[in-house]
Amino acid sequence: MIGAEEEALVLDVLRRKEPFRYYGPDFKPTPPMAAQLEKEFREYIGTKYALGVTSGSAALEVAMAAAGIGPGHEVIVNAWSWIACFTSIVRVGARPVLAEVNDTLNLDPKEIARLTTPKTRAVLVIHYQGVAAELEEIVLEAHKRGLYVIEDCAQSLGTRYRGRQIGTWGDLATFSFQYNKVMTSGEGGMVTTRDQRLYERAVRYHDLGNYRPYHATIAASHEPAFAGGQFRMSELTAAMALAQLRKVDRLWTHCRALQARILPRLAGLKGLKTRRVPDSAGDFGFEIYLMFDDPAHVASFREKLDARNVNCGQRTGTYPQYNRDYVKNGLAHTPSASPFREFKEWPAPGYRAEDFPATEALTKRFVALAIGWLYTAEDADYIADSIVAVHAEVMGG
């Protein structure tokens, strides 16, 4: 969906010669793009504060730091999740504690009670591929234990849960604008919160400890300065992201309309269900998950759909954290920074495939069907026809 709108806003930045978000030539007042993006973003999802950053991964690290998460702390996170969900926790010195997913392919709320220890500081809940996690139960379970809830909305901007946008249920939320996301500026991200203190801490961490006058107009400073990183969004990134944000609802409507043509055709197919969606009125609809009772059918089903030119791969490249090299070896950038260094044997319990029977079973028995902006109603009907036909071939009707 990249077109004239993005071009116009990016060219505006170039013509003004103001690619840096806090000042332009001769230190003129704050350029408009990042500020306008943050304003429209917080209005879109319905929250009080929004902060543009360099990437979704940066957003996760900034959110962790804003919550004061660091060495000696633990953060519960889906075992089935993207790389940055794990590495952002390690980057701030805390230990990721892996949790099972359920048939939503999101965090199983029951895992919070099982995994919470005196060291647990937060729950990082990932809304996987356009479907909201079971937020009511997750927030209740976390908050009654005094834990922060950080929503990772990187893959699911625009998704609703119980009539509210995701990113408004937890204490902090993060979003990604990387190329493979709902909206894109190549790279880029956003941190949101309703809490003034968390907002100020996020601003300071993302800008070398600074709290510039622009942010003070949004919320007065009450926090002391501390050493931070540098994750400032550029005006060029903000310009493209702003144009993209204004298109999200069109994309949501389009994908849901296509999904609505496909799903009724799948009802009643033996041995096959779709992913459980906690709120079917709010999911984005850009990817349908066929869940097979027998995982032995997955490979042949995928192969036959591929032969019919139906996209059916694992679209994000997501796979269980315990299968990744940085988990298998337990390393950080230097040995003393690893939160796993105290374990005498590695991988330790809680970081091995055999510790996650539910996640292992679920993630080996699905086929993912992508739906995008360029897909038409005819494409949706063809996908449905193909699934029915392949089901008859592979599973006997």
Image (cartoon, helix red, strand yellow):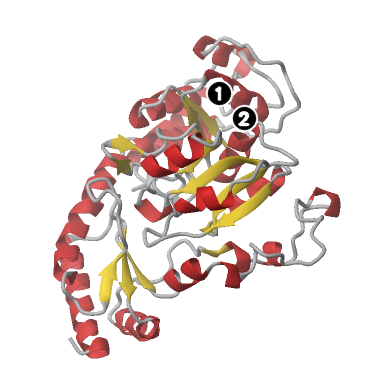
Disc count in the image?
Answer: 2
Viewed as shown, does residue 253 lie left or right of 119? left
User: Depth check: 243 or 255 in front?
Assistant: 255
Residue at 30% across, 41% down = 160
- Mark 1, other Cα within 10 Å: few <14 / some 14–19 / many ≥20: many
Q: Identify the image quadrant of residue 197.
A: top right
Which quadrant is home to the C terminus?
bottom left
- Mark 2, other Cα within 10 Å: few <14 / some 14–19 / many ≥20: many
Q: Earlier in the sequence, mark 2 or mark 1?
A: 2
From the image, tell me which residue sits under label 1.
199
Q: Which mark is residue 66?
A: 2
Residue 366 on image: x %, y %? 37, 72
Q: Amino acid at mark 2?
A: Ala
Tell me if I can see residue 174 in this picture: no
Q: Amino acid at mark 1?
A: Tyr
User: Depth check: 114 or 232 in front?
Assistant: 114
Instruction: State the CA–CA distance, disc 2 to disc 1.
Output: 7 Å
